[in-house]
Image (spheres, rainbow, N blue to C red):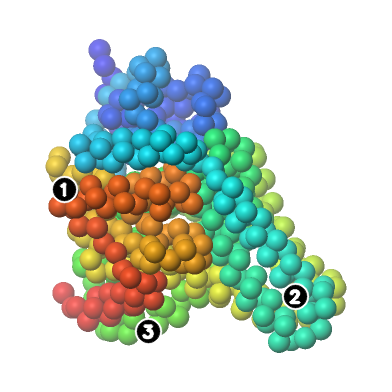
Amino acid sequence: MIEKIKIKDLREHCTEESAWIAIRSKVYDITSFVARHPGGKDQLRFGIGRDATTVFETYHNVENVQRVLNKLPIVGDLIDSELPQFNEASEFHKTINLKVRKRFHDAGLDMKNSHKAWLTYSVIFLSITLSFYQQYFGYMSNSTILQILCASILGFFCAQLGLHIMHDASHFSITHNPLVWKYLGSTHDFVNGASFIAWIYQHTFGHHPYTNIPNADPDIHVQPERDFRRILNYQKWFNYYKLQHIYAPILYAGLGVKTRLQDLRILYIQKSNGPISVNPLTIEQNILTIGGKIFFIFYRFLLPVLFGFTWTRVFALFLLSDIVTSYWLALTFQANHVVEEVMLPFQQSKDVDWAKMQVMTTVDYAINSVLTQLAVGSLNFQTVHHLFPGVLQHHYPLIQDIIYDECRKNNVKYNTKETLIEAVAAHIQFLKNMGEKEI
């Protein structure tokens, strides 16, 4: 007799010692498989104890992997859900997948590697190192103006570390080596002071599977009573929202500080990010998380003070740098998803197609600009990224036309803006519109 399993029972099996995972309503016991997973056991640790159908199918060739699933013991059937469910891949989705894989095969390219990526990473790490060194220890440290310049440059390239290195690692899209993903991603902890692990739960297991779905996508999670901004129609309207298009972008400057503090609350207190549950951290994950924050505090604050700079100057330079980082990350993210045409109400239905939903809830911008692509970590190819997060961002221009053509053939609206400025302006306008609408 097939056992009937509820989500709350599945959640109890979220450790390496007892690992269950739900795929297409079937609950598998993968305890014996965790250590043998070709993609590394760290990736399975994130997915166990939950319904990981959408993430699983996004990062695997489902037809091939199904043979592996067939060899694993089935515990029972999952009879409820706490997050939206989607149909199996549509013909639209299958066609895009086949054409993209063929494009890489015909071009003789590895979709997870590129010399351009490693060159970009090198420039980012070098720029962070030099700007920080000159800010406090080089000849530029003797001039306040030059220190301000260095702090600004440092802030920009810290954002680039998040947009390129950490982001690629969180999608397992740089090489096929799980150790590369883990340790490249963890540079975000040590350099930026923000948790790579918390980001994976929020972004890879939350935002990407459930893009712009209220109560599922952590990126549009709002406080139940009142939030600092109104972006969803069902939110209660308050008079101060009339000015949210002015004050909300100003508050985006605090994204960095908010994220670093929020990491600790999510991982150790709430043990969830909105509806996305967080599994118990391993010893290594704890070391990387806490060690990263300690190192960050040491090198950004204590080290400069030890070399004779005042706390006031160190804090002021850090604040400037962090504002640059926060603004660059916040505005590029918001321009992709929090705009009028993609904030669509989600209706759970058997007819919902995940791939089409991804297209309809994302906005591309400046796709003909190589400079923009480098500056925003290819987030300007957001539609491509959401359909193929496991593909290295440097390859997005190679396959964008496939997706655009299939959308046109299937009457799926492909959202795009001419420039980054136009995309950011659309976000500001959306805030203004939502602030004026009283329910």
Quarter of the figure that contains the N terminus: top left
- In this view, the residue in front, 391 or 371, is 371
Type of amino acid at the residue the image marks with label 3? Ile
Report the disc number at residue 135: 2
**Would you say residue 55 is visible in this rendering?**
no
Check disc 1: other Cα within 10 Å, few if <14, some if 14-19, many if 20+: few
Type of amino acid at the residue the image marks with label 2? Gln
* Residue bearing the label numbered 3: 246
The answer to whether 20 is drawn above or below residue 290 in the figure is above
Q: In whole angstroms, how far apart are the C-alphas of marks 2 and 1?
A: 53 Å
- Give percent across and percent down for residue 384: 36, 51
Q: In whole angstroms, how far apart are the C-alphas of marks 3 and 1?
A: 39 Å
Q: Is residue 330 shown left or right of residue 244?
A: right
Residue at x-position 38% and y-position 57%: 381
First in residue order: circle 3 vs circle 1: 3
Quarter of the figure that contains the C terminus: bottom left
- In this view, the residue in front, 170 or 47, is 170
Q: Is residue 79 shown left or right of residue 257?
A: left
- In this view, the residue in front, 125 or 433, is 125
Comparing marks 2 and 1, which lies closer to the viewer? 1
* Residue bearing the label numbered 1: 410
